[in-house]
Image (tube, rainbow, N blue to C red):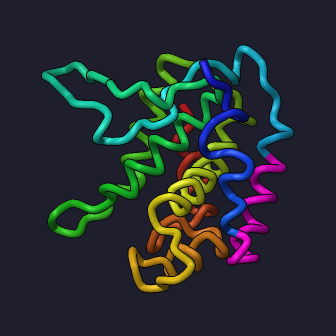
Amino acid sequence: MKNFYDGYYWGSHFDCLKVYPDVYQVAQELIGEIMNLPRDKESFGIIHCDMHPDNFYIEGDKINVFDFGDSQYGWFTLDIGIALFHALWWGQKDDKGNDFTNTIIKDFLKGYLSANHLSDFWISKIPMFMKYRQISCFVPWFFNPEDTKEHHQKEWIYNIENDILFDGIDLKSISKIIEGAKV
């Protein structure tokens, strides 16, 4: 089983960001913070590492998870950060435009914490891992230094540089929602 440090989204994978010095600096600072996190049995273990709506389906009252190709040893809060990032990216508003960001985060954490314990320290790291996923998604899906229009690249760069995950959702707001969601 691979380890987070050996994974695809680590190290030299971010080197292409050097053409965007501010984004590269943000990525390097984030990597530095992640490298200093503890790795113990309460915080670090086997995780899915790619949980999003295309990797599970709901059948009745059961959730069926698949595509374990990115599974690795990593922080449990990394897995939460990835899942929440994708949940918000793929659907923070319904067809009528009602925003349910708070509900997604609160319900997810309520469910997770009903089966698993996370200390306040680890819960506070979820937004950091959401930002990590944002940068990780930017590199393979939106990075093209020669095409500044494709895939809203300028918007992603601005958001990364300014601690904004999505339009109207910044990391400070996410932190407050998470803090209020603790059971």
Which residue is located at x 30 percent, y 56 percent? 91
Determine which quarter of the picture holds residue 7. Answer: top right
> Which sits in the foreground, 121 or 85?
85
> Which sits in the foreground, 94 or 79?
79
Res. 56 visible in picture: yes
Which residue is located at x 83 percent, y 50 percent? 32
Res. 179 visible in picture: no
Q: Is residue 25 magenta?
A: yes
125 vs 44: above or below: below
> Which sits in the foreground, 159 or 28?
28
Most common SS among magenta residues: helix
- Compared across the picture, whether 12 is left or right of 98 comes to right
Residue 147 spot, x, y in % from top left: 47, 83
Which residue is located at x 55 percent, y 58 percent? 134
> Which sits in the foreground, 138 or 104?
138
Count every numbered label the image shows and give the total. Answer: 0
- Compared across the picture, whether 181 is left or right of 61 comes to right
Magenta-colored span? 18-33
Which residue is located at x 74 percent, y 48 percent? 11
- Compared across the picture, whether 132 is left or right of 114 comes to right
Q: Is residue 26 magenta?
A: yes
Residue 76 spot, x, y in % from top left: 60, 28
Quadrant housing the N terminus: top right
Residue 82 spot, x, y in % from top left: 51, 43
Determine which quarter of the picture holds residue 23. Answer: bottom right
166 vs 13: above or below: below
Determine which quarter of the picture holds residue 167. Answer: bottom left
- Compared across the picture, whether 176 is left or right of 25 comes to left
Quadrant housing the C terminus: top right
